[in-house]
């Protein structure tokens, strides 16, 4: 978890930062990290999350105040296990960590080429730490023969007009290039790990790779390479394969595996580039809208739940069932979609198939009558006919499903209350 703040980096930094602080109120700011950026990139059309993350609002506390808290976030036991595992790897001058680094990256044994570990001023503020990281990275990249380990460097990443500070576990620099090292506490059993956890780690590491690409391009005065599948030939640019270090089997001995993150990098770059600038989103907010969670002197909330709900509703959301596992406000947005009878509650795929049909009621009517504003109605009629045929109840007058017709999956069409499924 980062402890840094997010500071806008454009020419209007002060007014924009002040506006974001006003939205948040006096409550502590929650900073963006690679995990939240990966979730944000997975749903770039959600203006609600973009505004709340840019303002540093505690979405878990906000969801609780709205009456729909979400069982979201890492287990405290998993966090503690990860801290213990990382501390063991970095004890005794990184003795345990150097073993997989030597095996996979070729880090030499002691005496051949001493591993340099510069002081990155971890007790300083985020801007100072980021500047020190940039200096250390440039110095290490300028000496191709040196081996340098950056322990918890702080990287900058431009996101929709504001700057996020990101903190990877480690970065190894050699030969003018760098490799991101991610330390995770989930085990590798018989050479295999949980694919879902590996995928999440790859998406998180891809955010660090993107930040390093931007930093290398900025130092060279050149734009980031247009093709995300091509490595940049610039000093200090990252390799597109990261090193994932995990416990081996059920012990604490580390093992490592190289993970290609080109696909995750391409997705992250594409999704973040689609995000609307935060300034435009703030301009669309109504006067008086804020997400102040701080209490008054007598302990009463400054903003009532109704006022907070109105402010949240003023920012458009792009809900899908996936949000329940990636966003703290997922349950609140799902309740809004259900109360509004929105088709978004059925998933992105169904929402795309329905075209201009925006509510479940309209979708059911189109499926029943075969009429609608576009070809989605015909598809729904076909889906309803398929479901009825599967249940042995072909509606009177229902048209047969033509061969090769593209239909909405039957499970995507809700049945009326009390109908058999």
Image: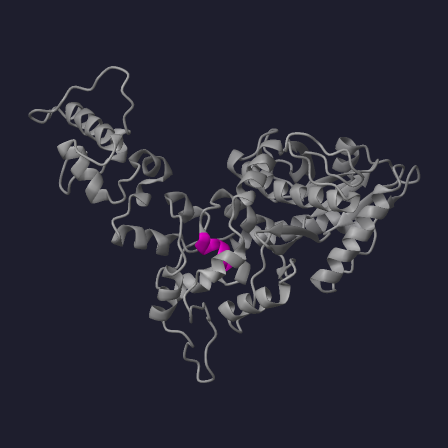
- Is residue 57 in view? yes
Instruction: Find the residue positioned furthest to the top.
Output: 403
Place of residue 188 in the rendered image (x, y in percent of width and height, measured from the top left): 60, 35
Residue 240 as seen in the image, left or right of residue 390: right
Up-down: is 318 above or below 13?
A: above
Q: Who is closer to the viewer here, 150 or 399?
A: 399
**Residue in view at x 78 percent, y 60 percent:** 121
Q: Is residue 51 magenta?
A: yes
Q: Who is closer to the viewer here, 29 or 363?
A: 363
Q: Is residue 144 magenta?
A: no
Query: Considering the image in quadrants, where does the N terminus appear?
Result: bottom right
Place of residue 313 in the rendered image (x, y in percent of width and height, measured from the top left): 36, 60
Place of residue 113 in the rendered image (x, y in percent of width and height, measured from the top left): 91, 39
**Residue in view at x 82 percent, y 47 percent:** 138
Instruction: Find the residue positioned furthest to the left.
Output: 396
- Is residue 415 in view? no
**Residue in view at x 51 percent, y 50 percent:** 276
Query: Considering the image in quadrants, where does the C terminus appear?
Result: top left
Quarter of the view holding residue 8 = bottom right
Q: Who is closer to the viewer here, 122 or 341?
A: 341
Place of residue 324 in the rendered image (x, y in percent of width and height, measured from the top left): 40, 48
Up-down: is 24 above or below 338?
A: below
Residue 254 as seen in the image, left or right of residue 80: right
Which residues are the magenta region? Answer: 47-53
Quarter of the view holding residue 63 = bottom left
Instruction: Find the residue positioned furthest to the bottom.
Output: 298
């Amino acid at each position: 978890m980062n402890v840094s703040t997010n500071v806008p980096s454009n020419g209007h930094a002060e007014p924009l930062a002040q506006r974001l602080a006003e939205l948040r109120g006096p409550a502590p700011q929650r900073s963006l990290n690679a995990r939240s950026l990966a979730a944000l990139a997975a749903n770039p059309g959600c203006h609600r999350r973009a505004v709340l993350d840019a303002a540093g609002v505690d979405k878990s506390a906000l969801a609780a105040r709205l009456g729909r808290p979400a069982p979201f976030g890492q287990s405290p036991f998993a966090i503690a296990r990860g801290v213990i595992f990382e501390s063991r790897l970095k004890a005794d001058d990184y003795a345990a960590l150097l073993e997989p680094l030597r095996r996979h990256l070729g880090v030499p044994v002691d005496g051949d080429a001493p591993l340099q570990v510069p002081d990155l001023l971890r007790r300083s503020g985020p801007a100072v730490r980021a500047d020190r990281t940039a200096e250390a990275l440039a110095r290490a990249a300028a000496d191709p023969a040196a081996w340098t380990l950056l322990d918890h460097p702080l990287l900058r990443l431009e996101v929709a007009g504001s700057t996020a500070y990101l903190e990877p576990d480690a970065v190894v620099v050699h030969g003018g290039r760098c490799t991101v090292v991610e330390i995770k506490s989930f085990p590798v059993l018989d050479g295999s790990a949980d694919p879902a956890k590996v995928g999440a780690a790859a998406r998180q590491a891809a955010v660090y790779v993107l930040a390093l690409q931007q930093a290398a391009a900025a130092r060279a005065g050149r734009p980031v390479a247009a093709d995300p599948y091509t490595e940049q030939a610039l000093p200090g640019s990252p390799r597109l394969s990261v090193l994932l270090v995990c416990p081996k089997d059920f012990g604490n001995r580390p093992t490592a595996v190289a993970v290609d993150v080109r696909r995750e990098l391409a997705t992250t770059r594409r999704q973040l580039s689609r995000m609307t600038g935060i300034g435009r989103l703030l301009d669309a907010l109504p006067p008086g809208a804020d997400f102040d969670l701080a209490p008054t002197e007598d302990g009463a909330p400054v903003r009532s739940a109704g006022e907070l709900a109105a402010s949240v509703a003023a920012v458009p959301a792009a809900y899908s069932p996936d949000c329940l596992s990636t966003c703290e406000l997922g349950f609140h947005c799902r309740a809004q979609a259900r109360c509004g009878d929105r088709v978004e509650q059925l998933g992105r795929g169904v929402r795309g198939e329905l075209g201009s049909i925006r509510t479940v009621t309209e979708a059911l009517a189109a499926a029943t009558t075969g009429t609608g504003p576009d070809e989605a109605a015909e598809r729904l009629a076909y889906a309803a006919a398929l479901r009825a045929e599967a249940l042995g109840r072909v509606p009177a007058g229902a048209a047969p499903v033509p061969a090769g017709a593209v239909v909405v999956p039957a499970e995507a069409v809700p049945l009326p209350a009390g109908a058999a499924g």
